[in-house]
Image (tube, rainbow, N blue to C red):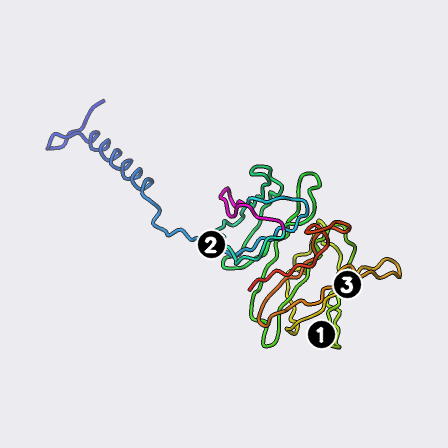
């Protein structure tokens, strides 16, 4: 090939090659440089409640990272845990260290708060989970914000009456077990109720026969608090596995 030379004696072909090498070098340098844009970390708050009877302590993972170890049945209330998440995050719950019994995906919103309730029995070696949106806002003067969940797998629908002095209120009417397709939009909201000490009766009905399965002399609803009441355990079981009414405090 005929080379055209400049006055300096350098071939134009050589210059072209040098330019190509320089361009390639700059391109590689740009690709290797760190992305100057800041990484936006999304965070939510989450409380996890283990209500699945006959299921031992659980390990909780999100996107492959351990969030909590040894989560016990009917565990005591803790504050919201910080939850760094992706647009769609995978939550796994394992029994005995490695036996995964819940493996599900959730979408969270930045700076929102949630409660995740594990429930049901180990049918098919799995339990169920329901993620509820929380709104732990101040319920107002003299009020407590409250919601109810029926999480006792073999207990029929319940009515709950609360008594304060000579007054009584039907707090829950014919609430059924939330089953495998819970309606999150219906279950999530809290409703205000006057704060104070209440006697609580949980009743079931079969035909015309009404049975009081729980008669609790005093449940204290503290002013300004946000709570979930939930039915736990199993009918005809005893001790911690028996039917009980639990109060889970969110704030």
2 vs 1, front mark? 1
Magenta stretch, main secondary structure, is strand
Q: Residues within 10 Å of mark 2 (few under 14, many from 20)?
A: some
The percent coordinates of residue 9 (x first, y second) are 12, 29
Q: Secondary structure at mark 3?
A: strand
Asked if disc 3 and disc 1 are in contact, CB closer than 8 Å, the reply is no
Left or right relative to 250: residue 177: right
Left or right relative to 75: residue 153: right
| 229 up-or-down from 3: above or below | below
3 vs 1, front mark? 1
Q: Residues within 10 Å of mark 3 (few under 14, many from 20)?
A: some
- Which region shows up in magenta? 60-73
Return the residue at label 2.
Answer: 42
28 vs 184, nearest the viewer? 184
Return the residue at label 1.
Answer: 164
Q: Residues within 10 Å of mark 1 (few under 14, many from 20)?
A: few
Return the residue at label 3.
Answer: 159
Q: CA distance from mark 2 to mark 1?
A: 44 Å
56 vs 116, nearest the viewer? 56
- Identify the residue at image location x=29%, y=39%: 29
């Amino acid at each position: 090939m005929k080379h055209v030379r400049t006055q300096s004696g350098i071939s134009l072909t050589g210059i072209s090659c040098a330019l190509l090498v320089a361009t390639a070098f700059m391109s590689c340098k740009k690709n290797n440089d760190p992305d100057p844009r800041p990484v936006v970390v999304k965070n939510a708050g989450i409380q996890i409640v283990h209500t699945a009877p006959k299921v031992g302590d659980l390990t909780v993972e999100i996107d492959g990272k351990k969030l909590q170890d040894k989560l016990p049945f009917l565990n005591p209330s803790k504050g919201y845990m910080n939850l760094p998440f992706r647009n769609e995050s995978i939550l796994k719950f394992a029994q005995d260290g490695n036996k995964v019994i819940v493996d599900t995906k959730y979408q969270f919103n930045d700076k929102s708060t949630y409660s995740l309730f594990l429930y049901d029995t180990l049918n098919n070696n799995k339990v169920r989970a329901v993620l509820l949106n929380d709104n732990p806002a101040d319920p107002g003067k003299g009020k407590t914000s409250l919601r109810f969940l029926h999480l006792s797998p073999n207990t029929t629908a319940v009515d709950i009456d609360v008594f304060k002095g000579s007054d009584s209120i039907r707090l829950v009417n014919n609430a059924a077990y939330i089953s495998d397709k819970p309606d999150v939009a219906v279950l999530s909201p809290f409703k205000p109720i006057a704060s104070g000490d209440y006697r609580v009766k949980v009743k079931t009905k079969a035909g015309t026969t009404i049975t009081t399965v729980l008669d609790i002399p005093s449940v204290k609803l503290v002013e300004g608090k946000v709570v979930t009441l939930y039915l736990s355990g199993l009918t005809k079981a005893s001790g911690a596995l028996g039917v009980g009414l639990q109060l889970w405090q969110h704030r």
